[in-house]
Amino acid sequence: MVTVEIYEFVRLFFEVPIYHLILEAVLIIWVLSLILKRTKKSKSSLSEKASLWDRLSEHEKEELIQEWTPEPLVPDDADLNPIKYDVIQGKVGKHVTIGGRQYLNAATHNFLGMVGDDRVEEAAVRCLRKYGVGSCGPRAFYGTIDVHLDLEKRVTQFLGTEEAVLYSLGFSTVASAIPAYAKRSDVIFADEAVCFAIQKGLQASRSEIRYFRHNDTAHLEQLIEEHNKASKKLKPKQAALVRRFLVVEGIYANTGAVCPLPELLRLKEAHKLRLFVDESLSFGVLGDTGRGLTEHFGVTARDVDLICVSMEASLGSVGGFTTGSFYVADHQRLSGQGYVFSAALAPLCAAAAMCVIDQLDEQPEMTAKLRSVCRAMHKALANIDGLELCGDEVSPVKFLQLSKPRLERQQSEAVLQNIVDQCREAGIALTRAHYLEPEEHRLPPPAIRVTCNRLMEPEDIRSIETALTRAAGAVLG
Amino acid sequence: MTAEQKRNALEVTPVQNGHIKSNGAHTVLNGTSSAAPTCSQPPAAAATSAAAPPAAEDDSLEECTLWVAFVTYLAYFVLVAVGYVKEFLFPVHQKEKDRQGYTPLYLSFESFYIRNVYRRMSACFNNPLASCPGGQIDIQLRETPDYGFSYSRTGEVRRCINFGSYNYLGFAENSGPCTDTAERLLRRDGVAPCSSRMHLGSQQCQDDLEALVAEYLGVEDAVTFSMGFATNALNIPTLVGRGSLVISDQLNHASLILGLRLSGATIDVFKHNDMKDLERKLRRAIVDGHPRTHRPWKKILIVVEGIYSMEGSICKLPEIIALKKKYKAYLYLDEAHSIGALGPTGRGVCEYYGCDTRDIDVLMGTFTKSFGAIGGYMAGSRRLIAHVRRHSHSMFYASGLPPPVAGQISAVLCELLGRGGAGVGRARIRRLTDNTRYFRKRLSQMGFILYGDDDSPVVPLLIFLPAKACAFWSELMKHNVATVIVGFPATPILKVRCRFCVSAAHNKEVLDKILDLIDKIGDDLEIKYSSRPRTNHPIEYGRC
């Protein structure tokens, strides 16, 4: 019986039309080639791709291994000149104690003067006594304390948004938020003066970054037009998938300028960009009730896609939050690296920040007082011989650059440091703006950073002005 | 002598490669780890304490049977098929208000897994606490009106035993000397500095803490940062850059991977804890140089973790140090989970193996797990730390440790150094070690597949099927035990597991209670997948 079947099979084989046989043969060859290609293609890791390894003898390989001399992990002279920074004893409030002497603090981001505030400290202590210090886990694994949820809700109530996401460090807030949305094929338009944390977020996102000149919306428009033209060349389906983001700061940490939000909103609407604003320095500062940039310009927070705020400035705490619509902000709960893979914020820091927001709600005039201090400081510092004032009138962070900068950056820095030291003698604690020079995208010019504190009285501002004028006069001649 | 008998005997048995693993068996010479025995010599005076080092074991991770693998695949297939059918009949419209004409932020396909698999398990995650994350926690119950898409708190609270938080030494407390120190420093130095360390944000308490950390670890200097994740992500770029090669373990944490990506160095990956693969990669890297230009690498950095948080395995430190010395590479050790949890005085995986901390170039760790605080540190030679301070992103742009946190950590360190006088620190470490070994041995004896080493307080119990994992979690929760289940993408998609974090805040009674529960639930759910031979002899607490 079997032979009959075989005979039938062979007979059919010859009766089948020729194209059928050719098709079958092609298919068989193709499947075989796929199978063979798969076994040949090993996982291409770094080491496998190299060619020297296969060509050299064992003896030669040993020689190369013996001869190879690595650089030292850190340069040998790293500890010859260790970096110096001031160490504060006690609180970093309106006054700071350095080396046993007290100075007026015009250097830290304590804009609302909440460091040392009794109510804030009591709230933090109460929280400490209930929850301990750490949260002992990421948000997903029993690290979510009800204080976190309460603060997130409070933030949304305060700003009028739908969802807020808390992070454990101000730097990581914006540095994790941007890569959660922007991926390799996307385009991000960013102001060239954005702070370092944003730069790291942009780098982590691997998107195409287009920097526009600082606060220059015309240049931004030009860049957007260029990109529009370039994307016309792509297939429409591909172009439709490219997301475009616009990243700016409310008040720039590097220049003290306020971003022109109405202009940016107009461009956003016209070209359908997603707008991310880092309001670390403008939250609690701008707006009649301290609600930040959007209130300052009379728009709602809904118009901005995502607001990122570091709580290490006006809110007198540690950590940060991002807030926006539910659609946008909730995504970070599964995609924000600094949120998913990190332990949750310490509950006492959340409690302190909540207390500050409560105080802002109860006494919105605090921000008006802060802004009047900023304006007074601006007037006071505008006319110092030899120093040029940078920064918006209402910005709590101002920069004093040399009117005649020296040829070398280091020389300018030395001169400015001299002025800072002389002010220190006069009882004012100032600081030069320090940057990681090789890493910054656009290194700002050397400057002294002066910050304003709501608790400063006119005589404090006068004493800062006097000290700076004298120091500048002495150093610059 | 069978392997079991050897393990329970009170003798130090040198392991194949000449390294000794111990967790309390030998006294540290001179009380400081700088004089601790090097890896190549067996420790002296070993016989006094009860814990004996384990003999050479089969380290391989046990696989499930083919049937279990098939059923797991089938489970995912069913989930995905149901998801496709559901979304075909009721298409998902991601509604976004006020944004007509904008490119959607997410492709609907990207969140398919979230909508159809993760959402069904979402009750297990993000449970809020209304108490300190200590040995017992108050979990706020939640309800979902829409099958897991959103949750709201009901207001009810349930007290549970906590097996999910990283509280190895039980320092997550809201009273006691550590909390008193935290409060004292809060009142003295404020809640936060509100400035970066270079801009007058550096406080005395942070400097004092750094000196204490350096002393504890037995190194020259240390620097602290206010977020553990950021310690890796912001500081690895100071050590390596373009032209350097980093060989990192397959299962390294996301913060390490992010830091390596941001640094611009070339990254190569070696199989998890596989020393032969590491050596092979090192040899090829040195011989070949850069893959395209064949320039020799500027430096080679090996990045490993002390305890891996999803597998519970301990890195093979003595072998890595031997390789590093042989091939002139540098070693970066991330002790996020192992600091405080391993070693007779909690000094981490170096002390556990009896290695010299000077052999490790960069010691990094976090204060989140064993110290009940937040933040991280980097420790090593004075030169290294001076370099890190000068180039760290965190020093220039991020806030320093808040004073109450620094207070908590220094109080914990003082206890661990034995300065409290009452020996509380040592007692906690002892309890953690006993708890860990007892818990692991009992679970293995019951027939569960566990990953990780015998001394690792991270105990992953493999369940494989996502539905069984959810059932396991909810059964335990019904009996007021809080655990963590972990699935994709933190683990491979087939290896869903329940991860227990043993803590010194638990005692034998609590462990017995939960072990009996797990035994019963394991039988009901049929998750005792281990095919290794089981023994019946009793496991004594404190002597295993």
Image (cartoon, grey):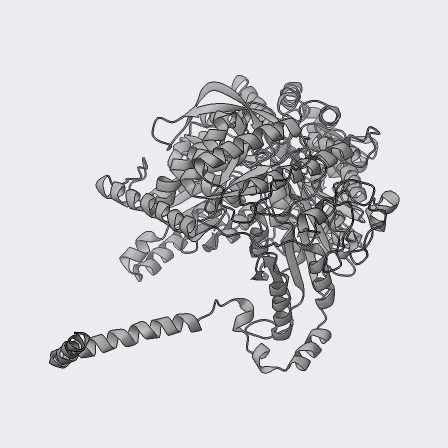
Residue A428 appears in the figure: no
In the displayed structure, would residue A262 be above or below residue A93? below
Picture quadrant where residue A320 is located: top right
Q: Residue at x 65, y 59 (%)?
A: B302
Q: Residue at x 34, y 75 (%)?
A: A33
Is B144 left or right of B504, judged from the image as shown?
left
Q: Position of residue A139 (x, y in %)?
A: 53, 35
Q: Position of residue A361 (x, y in %)?
A: 52, 20
Q: Position of residue B271 (x, y in %)?
A: 57, 59
Residue A29 appears in the figure: yes
Q: Residue at x 45, y 34 (%)?
A: B524
The one of A267 and A115 positioned closer to us in this rendering: A115
Locate the C terminus of chain B by quadrant.
Answer: top right
Q: Residue furthest toward the right? A: B30
The one of A88 and B134 positioned closer to us in this rendering: B134
Q: Position of residue B268 (x, y in %)?
A: 57, 62
Is B91 left or right of B417, judged from the image as shown?
left
The one of A79 and B307 positioned closer to us in this rendering: B307
For the image shown, how many numbered marks are present on the structure? 0
Is B32 left or right of A333, judged from the image as shown?
right
In the displayed structure, would residue B110 be above or below residue A39? above
